[in-house]
Amino acid sequence: MLTQDENDVLCRVGPGTRMGNLLRRYWIPALLSTDLPAPDCPPVRVKLLGERLVAIRDTSSRIGVLDEFCAHRGASLFLGRNEEHGLRCVYHGWKYNTEGYCVDMACEPPETDFKDKIRLKAYPVVEMGGIVWTYMGPQERTPSLPKFEWTLRPESHRHVLKTWQECNWLQALEGGLDTAHISFLHQGLPPAARSSARAKQYRVRSPAPKIEVELRDYGFCYAGIRPLGDDGNYVRAYQYVMPFHKYHPDQIGRQDEIKDTRVSGHAWVPMDDENTMVYNITYRFGDKPLKDDEERMRDSERVGELTGEFRKVRNKGNDWLINREVQRTDAYTGIEGIYTQDQAVQESMGPIVDRTREHLGTIDKAIVAARLQLLRALRTVESGGDPPGTSASYYFIRAIEKVLPCDVRWQEALKDELYPSEG
């Protein structure tokens, strides 16, 4: 349980807030590369940490993330013309380049130097892994580039999509860190559950995992350990990378297998205090491309039925299209789609959940660990230090799930696969 003050501190992300200051010390996903598909394409609105911004790809394919509003009279630059290496406001013709400098004032006399005195707020960007990342913090404290393993994989080996979630970023993150819920929220009812995939069978057989957390300098690695009797322990090991990234295994292997396998992950990026853009990533780290999984990927997008704003048609306004007959006879939720099931329970808590009313149990160790790390990171930044997750230490971490003998420690058995760069 958190105090009201602690809850407010962790949830409020706007300019000048304590959590906002912390989150601005990281590279933040701003939009998909496909949102800016070509040079001089239309600008795109972006909302990050309570700030209204606009993104462009200029004539030379340079990307800019700028203040949405013209420095002249405050008109939205979303209406602007993206032309000849800059974004021109349609109101009076002021034009800005990707770094925010005003490069032309068509309505001012040619001899004036007024334009040289004007610069919009603009943030540095880097394009990696099909995502445009931006850094909103002090330039002298710019962190290492966000080179997650999946960002370095070819397009054939990764898949990225995003969805708009209508709740605070922290409850979305905590929903992702919770491993016990997969035995219920995403399961069918018996006997259907007993006939499902091998990993799902394990989750039904052993619904109460023991949670173990191993702190790392980027966040932590944690595992849900489910005893299977004589068959050993089903271990699902995750990675949490500060401040809002989580990676989970997407394909189970046996103890002696070196898998050419999948990993999935999410980044829960705060748009403001009550809205989150969720980036969903799946990739293969071996030689095998994702081609075999294309149908599954298409299904995940179809289930979401995304609008042009990346909102789900299945949303809190229509109770996520819950089907009570399906819930009664076939599945716990009656809601179609794993991501939509997650979103439904997290949004059902309200825009910002009141954590002073919660009662946490042993299955919530990863959630508690994340809160403590975030609170410690706040104090680190406020004392002049760099928070966890700003160095290169997370570059080649992975998430793995396997069945291990009962007398084997997962930390040792999975070490080379969880941290291949250290092996």
Image: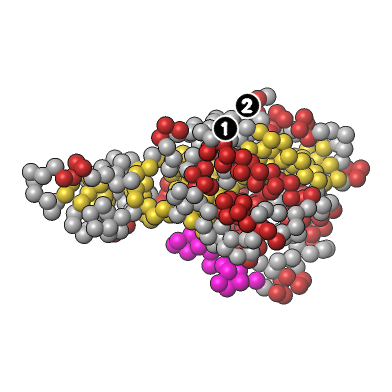
Is residue 15 in view? yes
Labelled pair 1, 2 in contact (Cβ < 8 Å): yes
- x and y percentages locating residue 51 in the rendered image: 41, 53
Q: Within 10 angstroms of label 1, few (less than 14), some, or many (20 or more) residues?
A: some
Q: Return the residue at label 2.
A: 421
Whether 5 is drawn above or below 157: the answer is: below
- Report the magenta residues as a range: 301-322
The image quadrant of residue 253 is top right
Of the 4 image quadrants, the one containing the N terminus is: bottom right
| Secondary structure at numbered mark 1 | loop
Q: Which mark identifies residue 242?
A: none
Residue 303 in magenta stretch: yes
Residue 414 placement, left or right of 303? right
Among numbered discs 1 and 2, the one appearing first in the sequence = 1
The quarter of the picture where the C terminus appears is top right
Characterize the local packing of mark 2: few (<14), some (14-19) or many (20 or more) Cα atoms within 10 angstroms: few
- When asked about the image quadrant of residue 183, the answer is bottom right
Q: Position of residue 259 (x, y in %)?
A: 69, 36
Seen from the viewer's position, the closer of residues 49 and 232 is 49
Q: Residue at x 77, y 29 (%)?
A: 412
Q: What percent of the width, then of the height, locates residue 418?
A: 68, 33
Q: Residue at x 66, y 54 (%)?
A: 3
Q: Measure how far apart labels 1 and 2 are at the Cα level.
A: 9 Å
Residue type beneath disc 2:
Ser
The picture places residue 270, in percent across and down from the top left corner, at 51, 52
The residue that mark 1 highlights is: 395
Above or below for 272 versus 321:
above
Outermost top residue = 423
